[in-house]
Amino acid sequence: MEVSLFYPSLALFCIILALKLFPRRKTHRRLPPSPWPALPFLGHLHLLTPPLHRTFHRLSLTHGPIFSLKLGARRVVVVSSPRLVAECFTANDVIFSNRPRVLADKYIGYNHTTMAGGPYGPHWRSLRRLAATEALAPARLNALGGAREEEMRLALQKLATTGDDFSAVELRPRIFDLIFNVIMRMLAGQGNFSGGGEEFGGRIHEMVSEVFEAAQSSNPEDFLPFLEWMDYRGLKRKLGELGKRLDDFYERLLAEHRRERRSTIIGHLLALQESDPLFYTDQTIKGFITNMIIAGTDTSVVTIEWAMSLLLNHPHILKSARLELDSVVGSHRLVEEQDLLNLNYLQNIISETFRMFPAGPLMLPRESSADCKVGGYDIQRGTILLVNAWAIHRDSDVWDEPMSFKPERFEEREVEIEKLMPFGMGRRACPGAGLGRRMVGLTLASLVHCFDWERMGPNEVDLAEGVGLTMPKLKPLEAMCRPRQIMLHALL
């Protein structure tokens, strides 16, 4: 018995001696301020009410332009000032170039391997080069400009069949059809998935909508790991099934391109696969298709809907935009992408829409890969960074009369990128910004140029915000629309 107690006693003595001789150093970290209370296990999850950008703005009024939250097992820091944003994405840009892992990206983003959701590193940099120099390079976008303009003409012709008198039009589904068909035309050489005429392609709209529904930033499974293990809502099963359906659709597109050798983005990527099969794998190509469809569709749709809502509430601005279009383009033809460079007032309208109603009110989240400092505070490795672009865009210290719709504020003014961030900032800014601006510009210009627009009644369009990964209108825009007589010959 005495022998059996000797070794445990010796071990205990050594531990006590070590603690006395080598006391554990206390690390004093200066963390950003945090609201009270933080509940056990949940942290501050109970404080999150949609829309999140408004909740975070209210918290920033109390706790300052940088504050921290404990969301379940994750630490989150929210930033809402241009100075702090510049600090995050200049000196600390590499550190904040990771993405936090979320459940939706595991099943829809090919296990975090796409350009949008993959970790920062050599593979991600190769994907970024693929987008910048191959698929979304200006020369390739120019080469596909005719396809975009043709899809635009088809969409305008459908809208023109409403007749010579004003008729009510719900704009969101029409814009969605147009933007989606444009992207599919660029990717696959075929649009017209919107009407459901093709058995499988007709359901792609539904799948895209399901992706956005599943990709909400407030899924509790992303912050409480035990909920993922339990899968009490069946979210893993739903995401797995959705990922499988999308993958089947992509497999079909690749098979068609291999047979027909189409001159499209997918066709170009498959040609590159022949010379570099190790990088241009089928999974890499399918991941790129996912990013194009998901990132390119809804952001453009909500921006155009917000822009039209603002124009209907400010008819004098709508009139000025039309006068510019009639002066630059005339009435003998439709707007072309090359006209956009000369439509300065229209570009100001788009910039002001980006400011007031950014499609991504919270920039896509980043995650710190190392300890760093922001605003004098210690940010630990693994912290999620959220930038409240919506709050910065409406900050009276940054903008004069921030609640007013004033496109003229952008006349002859170069705005610092950290003050207006419709496409993000830093290494992980959206690589499709050029395409997004073209699609929004061409669509908005065409709608204003070819049709007369009025509100449904004397009341202004409701500008209440909905919830989602992007920021849609709470109430879809419905307006009175009539083809302009002087444009009928160009339309039809």
Image (tube, rainbow, N blue to C red):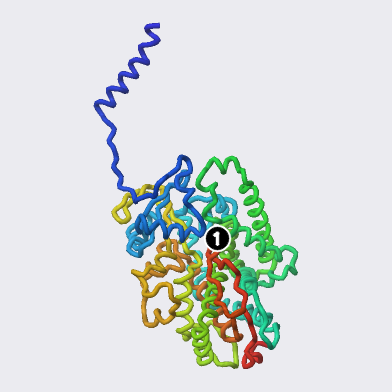
Residue 190 quadrant: bottom right
Observer-nearest residue: 155 or 136? 155
Relative to 411, residue 262 above or below: above
Secondary structure at badge 1 equals loop
Relative to 365, residue 473 above or below: below
Residue 14 quadrant: top left
Observer-nearest residue: 276 or 37? 37
Within-10-Å neighbours for mark 1: few <14, some 14–19, many 20+: many
Where residue 445 sits in the image (x, y, percent)?
55, 82
Task: Tell me: 183 left or right of 430.
Answer: right
Residue 449 quadrant: bottom right
> Can you say which quadrant of the picture contains the N terminus?
top left
Query: Tag count in the figure?
Result: 1
Task: Tell me: 117 left or right of 201.
Answer: left
Is residue 115 in sight in this rendering? Answer: no
Q: Residue at x 50, y 81 (%)?
A: 314
Looking at this rendering, what residue extends furthest in the front direction?
458
Residue assigned mark 1? 468
Q: Residue at x 30, y 22 (%)?
A: 16
Relative to 314, residue 281 above or below: above
Is residue 29 in sight in this rendering? Answer: yes
> Can you say which quadrant of the picture contains the C terminus?
bottom right
Q: Residue at x 64, y 50 (%)?
A: 240
Observer-nearest residue: 282 or 477? 477
Where residue 475 sits in the image (x, y, percent)?
59, 68
Where residue 292 sits in the image (x, y, percent)?
56, 65
